[in-house]
Amino acid sequence: MPYKYLITVSGEIPLKSWRSRPRFYKTLIKNLSEVLREYGSTNYSFKIVDAKILLESDIDVLEDLSKVFGVMRVGEVDLISFSDLGDLVRKVGERTAGLVANKKFAVRVKRFGTHNFTSLDVARELGSFLKPYSAGVDLENPDVEIILEVRGPVTYLYKRLAEGVGGLPIGTEGRALSLLSGGIDSPVAAWLVAKRGVLVDFLHFFMGSPSASRLAFTVARTLTKNWFYGHNPRFYLIDLTHALNYIRVNIRWEFRQVVLKTLMYYLASKIAAGNYEAVVTGESIGQASSQTLANLSAAQVVSGLQLPILRPLVGFDKEEIVSIARKVGTYEISSMVGEPCSIAPSRVRTRVTVEELRNEFAKLPEDLIEKALSTLKILEVRSSGLEDVIPDKSVVIDYIPEDAVVLDLRDLDSYLEWHYPGALHYESVNLEDLRDKTLVLYCDRGNVSYVEALKLREKGFKAYSFLNGAEGLRRGLT
């Protein structure tokens, strides 16, 4: 087999009790095997060497191995057997002399086992052997590092090295349901929890924007393909558009956001009951009005959610979250999701009491909640496609038909600042005068217009929601 990898596992794994440790290694090896199978390997083997794992493979998967949770470091190595210090220095020196030619170098040695020499002896003797071929030794800023580990009668000479992310192998710490909007925060939260060995599934609420839901699924697939080796997450999809419309009409302005959060908690509790040990969210203290400590606490109490809510971002600021999103590879996709059309852009309460919130939440009819639950669709991230994600695509349109009347649903100030050429402000028209017309509605991003188009269709209008709202229209004009 042409490729040999020495895998350094997370430092906490070897420290597990003798009863637990085999389970962690077994799960990690299973997840590493999935990397190999995914990339077409047909011949590979694993061996535990002290606390490390030696993998022999017929394909090169160095970078992908480094993304498996539970891996701290992985290096492609040559295995060199030796009889004594002189034999070790000669064999390693002959293989590395060309690497240091006309370059400054440093030798880094780790030694494990019983030998009649030390790590310093190996570094000094090998340095002396290589120096005539090089531009000299530079331990602080070398051009080339010669890295080796001496373990018993074998030296592992590193050819390439990739740093891993550590954590615990997925599948060693239970299962959690992660609320996934697709925006920057929630995927990072899911990634951080999965990094601790948790099998993370996703719950996404469709809020009227097919584009946002497609992007959310794309984010879930990116996390799964690049990081969740050993796991095929479920993607739960609930259509929340009718509930959103009800909240917009019947809930007091200042409570709408926190009532919506409470509803999401409540629906998550129904799906998670009996199947999950926790719910994951991307909330950070004070980042939004619904994420103050008072509102988070009240929402959880009123929702009746009994499972722990894991909030790995609770103390992070936005710059820290963005940094992790870039590292994980979700930032670019998440940046396209944006925020949904707001149901309460201002005058929002930041300190609701449990009693106040319970009174507002009680205004949601039970059949409305049951209707939302009845829309539940369950997909498997690895095997489902984008075409499986979007409900009722016929309502959404990405062009303006000839002779259509374009209606702007945003507030008047936004309309006056910019609107699609010829568009009418929704509050200024008499809909009955437009009954025979094709209506194309838009809001900021397509959420509110989607719900409104559905309502107009129920009344017999030929109504559509423009894909991606005002942003989509602006892009079409440039």
Image (cartoon, grey):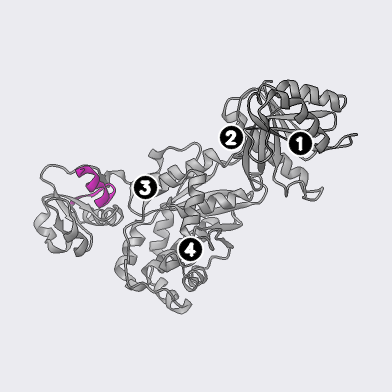
Q: Quadrant of residue 51?
A: top right
Labelled disc at residue 336: 3
Whether 350 is drawn above or below 333: the answer is: below
Labelled disc at residue 35: none
**Label 2: few (<14), some (14–19) or many (≥20) C-alpha neighbours in 10 Å:** some
Q: Position of residue 357 (x, y in %)?
A: 43, 74
Q: Residues under labels 1 and 3: Cα distance?
A: 47 Å
Q: Earlier in the sequence, mark 4 or mark 1?
A: 1
User: What amino acid type is highlighted by mark number 2?
Assistant: Asp
Q: Residues under labels 4 and 2: Cα distance?
A: 38 Å
Instruction: Please give the range of residues in magenta.
Output: 462-478
Q: Earlier in the sequence, mark 4 or mark 2?
A: 2
**Label 1: few (<14), some (14–19) or many (≥20) C-alpha neighbours in 10 Å:** many
Asked whether disc 2 touches disc 1, contact meaning CB atoms under 8 Å apart, the reply is no
Asked whether disc 4 touches disc 1, contact meaning CB atoms under 8 Å apart, the reply is no
Tell me: 333 left or right of 285.
Answer: left
Q: Secondary structure at mark 4?
A: helix
According to the image, label 4 marks what residue? 266
Tell me: 411 left or right of 151.
Answer: left
Of circles 4 and 1, the one toward us is 1
For this rendering, which residue is in front, 342 or 57?
57
Q: Position of residue 365 (x, y in %)?
A: 38, 67
User: What amino acid type is highlighted by mark number 1?
Assistant: Val
Query: In the rendered image, is residue 379 in sight?
Result: no
According to the image, label 1 marks what residue? 109
User: What amino acid type is highlighted by mark number 4?
Assistant: Tyr
Whether 121 is drawn above or below 23: the answer is: above
Q: Earlier in the sequence, mark 3 or mark 4?
A: 4
Q: Earlier in the sequence, mark 1 or mark 3?
A: 1
For this rendering, which residue is in front, 408 or 375?
408
